[in-house]
Amino acid sequence: MTDDALVLDATTRDALLDHAREGANRERPAEICGVLGGTRGPPDHVTDARRVPNVATHPRTEYELDPASTMETIDRIEDAGGEAVGFYHSHPESDPVPSATDRARATWTGYVYVIVSPVADAIRAYRFTGDGFTEIPVRVD
């Protein structure tokens, strides 16, 4: 049996929540997003959350990672000896569950997609199976 989970270090958890609060507290609340770095598992270990600009047309209710910044960020993570574990974004005004847009835009099969809710102070993780998302436990070390 594998331990399909996401393990966050406490500093990274705090960074994710802080970034999500920044997006929620803007004059026009916006989803924030970025790349998660660490070691792929299972379980996946995340020790780094790197911000990437949200270039979505409607950032209050959707996110789109800037493609060039995303690839540069993944390269920097790998150059530092880590691996891209997945991606994160926030839902500034709703629960941290995948929306229809989140499901439609997911493309990295096997990777973790984290949704952060500053409203609930919650972080949830989902593994993209290629057909949809499966929620996986989040542990903080």
Image (cartoon, rainbow, N blue to C red):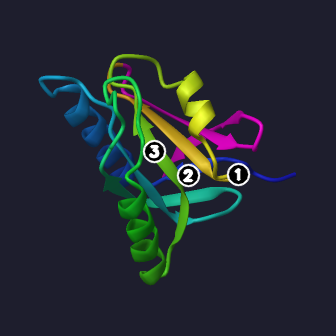
The image's mark for residue 109 is 1
Place of residue 83 in the rendered image (x, y in percent of width and height, measured from the top left) = 54, 70
Residue 98 in view (yes/no):
no
Q: Main secondary structure of the magenta part?
A: strand
Three-letter code, disc 1: Thr
Report crowding for label 3: few under 14, some 14 to 19, many 20 or more residues within 10 A (C-alpha). Answer: many
Instruction: Give the SS element for disc 3.
Output: strand
Q: Give the Cα distance between marks 2 and 1.
A: 19 Å
Give the residue displayed 69% in from the left and 35% down from the top: 133
Q: Give the magenta-colored segment's residue range.
A: 120-141
Q: Of residues 19 and 137, which is closer to you in this image? A: 19
Side (left or right) of 23 relative to 102: left
Checking the image for residue 7, the label placed there is 2
Residue behind mark 3: 88
- For the residues labelled 3 and 1, the Cα–Cα distance comes to 15 Å
Furthest residue to the top? 94
* Residue 128 location (% of width, % of height): 68, 43
What label sits on residue 85 in the rendered view? none
Which callout, 3 or 1, points to the residue nearer the camera?
1
Front in this rendered view, residue 100 or 34: 100
Residue type, mark 2 in image = Val
Earlier-in-chain disc, 3 versus 2: 2
Q: Which marked residue is nearer to the observer: mark 2 or mark 1? A: 1
In the image, is residue 56 part of the stretch drawn in magenta?
no
Q: Amino acid at mark 3?
A: Tyr
Name the mark nearer the viewer: 3 or 2.
3
Q: Is residue 128 magenta?
A: yes
